[in-house]
Amino acid sequence: MNYAFVNLPAVNTDIIEAVDYYKKINTELAKQFLFRIEEAMKYIADYPEGFQIKYNNVRTLMLKQFPYQIHYTINVEEKQIVILAIIHCYKAPEDYSER
């Protein structure tokens, strides 16, 4: 079944903040971070239910190479994968659960 991706508005902020951080270190690192997000999204699209539910029907996928996770839910009725956050692994889910 094909699902459409829907990002909560705060997801763009998550990405921008991480990219800005990595740009300060190295612009190639920032590009690699974006590539890893794209790679993970493709994997989620292929296997949306392939990841364990961690809390409140939220699944997570760890990015390769970076300490970030994509938190998402599946809305079967709307055929959507809802991206809730892309956040650093050391942040607690409560830090963004009120989005």
Image: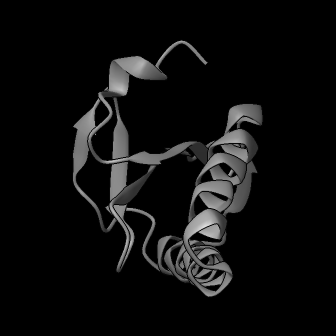
Q: On the picture, is 42 further left or further right than 3?
A: left
Q: Nearer the viewer, residue 62 or 73?
A: 62
State left or right for residue 52 relative to residue 94. Answer: left
Residue at 28% x, 61% y: name it. Answer: 51
Q: Quadrant of residue 55?
A: top left
Q: Position of residue 35 (x, y in %)?
A: 61, 83
- Residue 80 visible at all: no
Who's the residue at 33% across and 61% down the image? 67
Residue 6 position, x and y percent, is: 73, 48
- Name the quadrant of the C terminus: top right
- Percent of width and height locating residue 13: 72, 40
Where does the image place residue 64, in percent across and percent down from the top left? 36, 79
Q: Can the viewer see residue 16?
A: yes
Q: Among all residues in the image, which is located at the extreme top?
A: 98
In depth, the one of 79 and 38 nearer the eye is 38
Q: How many marks?
A: 0
Looking at the rendering, which quadrant does residue 29 occupy? bottom right
| Image quadrant in which the N terminus is located | bottom right
